[in-house]
Image (cartoon, rainbow, N blue to C red):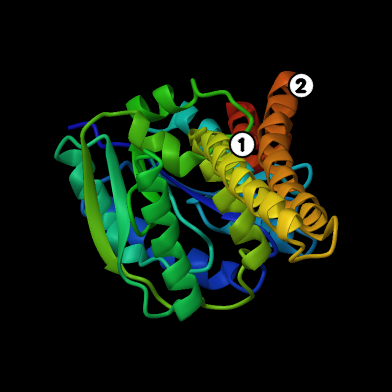
Amino acid sequence: MNLPKLTIVVPCYNEEATLEETTKELTRVMDELVEGNKVNKESIIFYVDDGSSDNTWGIIEEKTEKNPYVQGLKLSRNFGHQGALIAGLETARKFSDCVISIDADLQDDVDVIKEFVGKYQEGYEIVYGVRDKRDTDTPFKRNTALWFYSLMEKLGVKLVPNHADYRLMSKTALDEFVKYQEENLFIRGIIPLLGFKTAKVYYNRKERFAGESKYPLKKMIAFALEGITSFSVAPIRAVSFLGLIMVLIGFGIAVYTLFSKIFSYTVSGWTSLMLSIWIVGGVQLIALGIIGEYIGKIFKEAKRRPRYTIEHNSYYEKQKVTPMDRMKSK
């Protein structure tokens, strides 16, 4: 039986404090899979350094020399978590039968990787890791995440609740995934669009092993806006609906203004001034902001810039070593 070649893609940004333990845990899981004849012994752990400013890449290079599973991909600068993940997935699909993506902070339970592989061998093309409990998250983060999933569902966007970027994808699914070439690629929304046979594996989220979260409130808000505007024009329609409401309110206030003017209940010009400055002005700014968000996306897409730039790829560099070079190294 031909065993599948598995690649575990791990985006990294300033993760020098976690890489030692992450490598230890992923190596343990990979050993168990190889020894249990679940995956090919040439399976790898593929770290993607997203332009880290610390010694993350230095540690990855060291691991590639000492650990037979570890290979690394270095991006030329910081492209963001989603950009690094896309770079890892698109690169790994070329030499893998299936790919699992996981964050480097060890909050996702690495032991369920074995369940992912089991589901893949049962014929599932995509396997989602779904958080059964989020006790380690703050109440604010937990509640805002639930609100986000609920909002996206109402907007008609199909997402898997409590699923982040911990998943397995077969080469077949990845081949379809890379056909989506838009720059503003919202991965969690794209994957369900692919179709294919899917399964879910539930696990409990752990505390971060070390370091700081790479998703502060600012990035969480930006990520949510990216998802909403990438998959739905509902905000634009909401602006039109809001405009209609404001016209009706304005008509009512106009009637009230005329009534007050006739009976001298107010200072001349006060109502119309408040109406124009606060209500109409506020609605216009909101409308311009939402429309500008979509125009900005069109601007980015029109330029067709690459989503990432690779500086080093240790896996490909390793393949360039000739048999004669290997003999000399011995």
Q: Is residue 74 above or below residue 65?
A: above
* Dot 1 amino acid type: Lys
Toward the front, the furthest residue is 263
* Dot 2 amino acid type: Lys
Front position in the image: 119 or 298: 298
Which is more N-terminal, label 2 or label 1?
A: 2
Location of the N terminus (image quadrant) = top left
Mark 1 Cα-neighbour bin, 10 Å: few <14, some 14–19, many ≥20: few
Residue ID at (61%, 43%): 251
| Picture quadrant where residue 126 is located | top left
Checking the image for residue 70, the label placed there is: none
Q: Position of residue 6 (x, y in %)?
A: 37, 42
Q: Which residue is mark 1?
A: 318
Q: Position of residue 4 (x, y in %)?
A: 29, 36
Q: Which residue is mark 2?
A: 303
Q: Identify the secondary structure beneath mark 1.
A: helix
| Picture quadrant where residue 132 is located | bottom left
Q: How many marks?
A: 2
